[in-house]
Amino acid sequence: MSVVQKAIETQLKNIQTKTGKSLEELGKIAQASGLTKHGELREFFKRELGLGHGDANALVHAILNSD
């Protein structure tokens, strides 16, 4: 595993700890929001979960690429 991939995994674990929700649960929240664009979802998570820009961005990237 590359250093970058390990850092991304660590960031995603930290997001799950901060929110108290699994990636699957966060994905369902994203789906339920009705938003589909990366930027819209990023702003949604920043607003609704209090995530910083980088965490929200990484989360949306993981969710959108997990299909």
Image: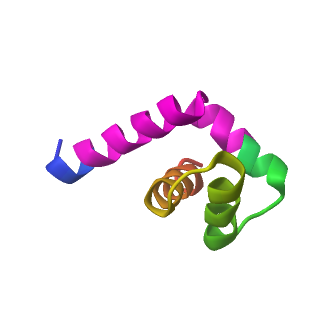
Task: Please determine whether, in this image, residue 59 is positioned above or below residue 54.
Answer: above
Assign the N terminus to one quadrant of the image: top left
Q: Give percent across and percent down for residue 31.
A: 77, 49
Image point (57%, 50%), residue name: 63
Q: Identify the magenta region.
A: 6-28
Q: Residue furthest front?
A: 50
Depth check: give the residue in front, 14 or 28. 14
Q: Main secondary structure of the magenta part?
A: helix
Q: Is residue 20 found left or right of 62 in the rendered image?
A: right
Q: Is residue 55 left or right of residue 47?
A: left
Residue shown at 69% from the left, 69% from the top: 40
Residue 58: percent from left, percent from top = 46, 56
Q: Is residue 6 left or right of residue 64?
A: left
* Residue at position x 58%, y 56% in the image: 64
Which residue is at the front of the view, 62 or 12? 12
Q: Is residue 66 left or right of residue 25?
A: left
Q: In the picture, residue 14 is in which quadrant? A: top left
Q: Is residue 37 above or below residue 59?
A: below
Q: Quadrant of residue 47?
A: bottom right
Residue drawn at x 65%, y 40% is 26
Q: Judge whether 5 appears above or below 18 on screen.
A: below
Picture mark count:
0
Rendering coords of residue 7 (x, y %): 26, 46
Q: How is the image coloured?
A: rainbow
Q: Residue 16: x, y in percent?
A: 51, 33
Task: Please name whichever residue, 60 or 66, is drawn nearer the observer in this view of the structure.
Answer: 60
Q: Is residue 9 magenta?
A: yes
